[in-house]
Image (tube, rainbow, N blue to C red):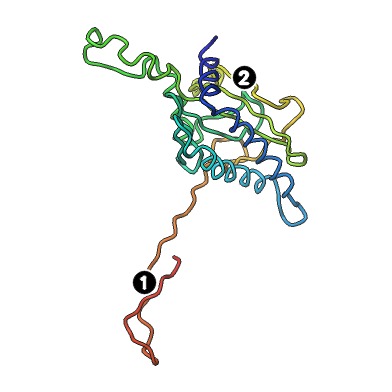
Amino acid sequence: MGLLGDAVAVLDERGVLEPLGGLVRQVYRRAADRHEPELGDDAMSFGTTVWRNLTNLGKATFDGIDGVRVRVEDNSLEILCSGYVVRLYSLQGGIESIRWEGSEARLGGAVENSRDRQLAFDDEEQFPGVFSGVVPPKRHVRVAHTGDITTGEATAYLGLPRDNRDGGSPWFEVMLWFGDATTVGTPLPAVGDPAGVPGQRHDELVIPELSIESLPPFPAHGRTAGGSVGRWA
């Protein structure tokens, strides 16, 4: 069993993969059911709906499960379990075409997986393998997913991302998790340079924070002055 097989076995045993796979399928089906091109929907809105639904419903799905921590980092779902870090990304084409350098968040896991050693000590002889068995050798796992915009049939892969900025595959290991990669799935467009240069994607869009400011007091027409009212900025 390789490192990806080890990760799959652990995540499956801890109850992560079954509900996560079910959620991906459910979200794509619902997004396809709600997709109405005649009302202005397009592939971009479809992809954004999938991304936000996976993030919000994923957080709710895994909150409170023993041994599993879930959080939203960089506007995307992140699941932490038994030393593994699982993140989801939409697939814009073939599985080998995925790019990690589009943002620091995407690239970070691939870079960490690609290091020969994850920990360093001033005196390695004093602490040989001190954390072996605690932190997996390649702890970052990625779910690459896509789906048919009409039928809602989803395809997903599980893989260990690799830093391939110097060439080669973007994966150390990758496997088809479910779906039929040869017939199912319409690539969803990336938000960025149309020529294919890595840019901001719909699953990395920044959600603006709304601030509250105080307005000057209203004139005292039969009411006390000095009050303030909130205004969305």
Which badge, 1 or 2, is on the more N-terminal residue?
Answer: 2
Q: Residue at x 59, y 19 (%)?
A: 174
Secondary structure state at the residue bearing disc 2:
strand
Specify the amino acid type for callout 2. Met
Task: Give the image quarter of residue 226.
Answer: bottom left
The residue pinned by badge 2 equals 175
Which of 158/16 is in front?
16
Q: Residues within 10 Å of mark 2 (few under 14, many from 20)?
A: some
Tell me whether circle 1 and circle 2 mark residues in contact (CB < 8 Å): no
Give the number of the disc on residue 232. Answer: none
Q: Residue at x 70, y 35 (%)?
A: 147
Q: Residues within 10 Å of mark 1 (few under 14, many from 20)?
A: few
Secondary structure state at the residue bearing disc 1:
strand
Specify the amino acid type for callout 1. Ser
Which of 91/198 is in front?
91
Q: Position of residue 178 (x, y in %)?
A: 68, 26
Which of 67/215 is in front?
67
Q: Residue at x 51, y 15 (%)?
A: 6
Cα separation, mark 1 vs mark 2, equals 54 Å
Q: Position of residue 141 (x, y in %)?
A: 51, 25
The residue pinned by badge 1 equals 214
Task: Give the image quarter of residue 189.
Answer: top right
- The C terminus: image quadrant: bottom left
Q: On the picture, is 227 further left or further right than 139?
A: left
Q: Position of residue 15 (x, y in %)?
A: 54, 27
Q: Residue at x 28, y 9 (%)?
A: 128
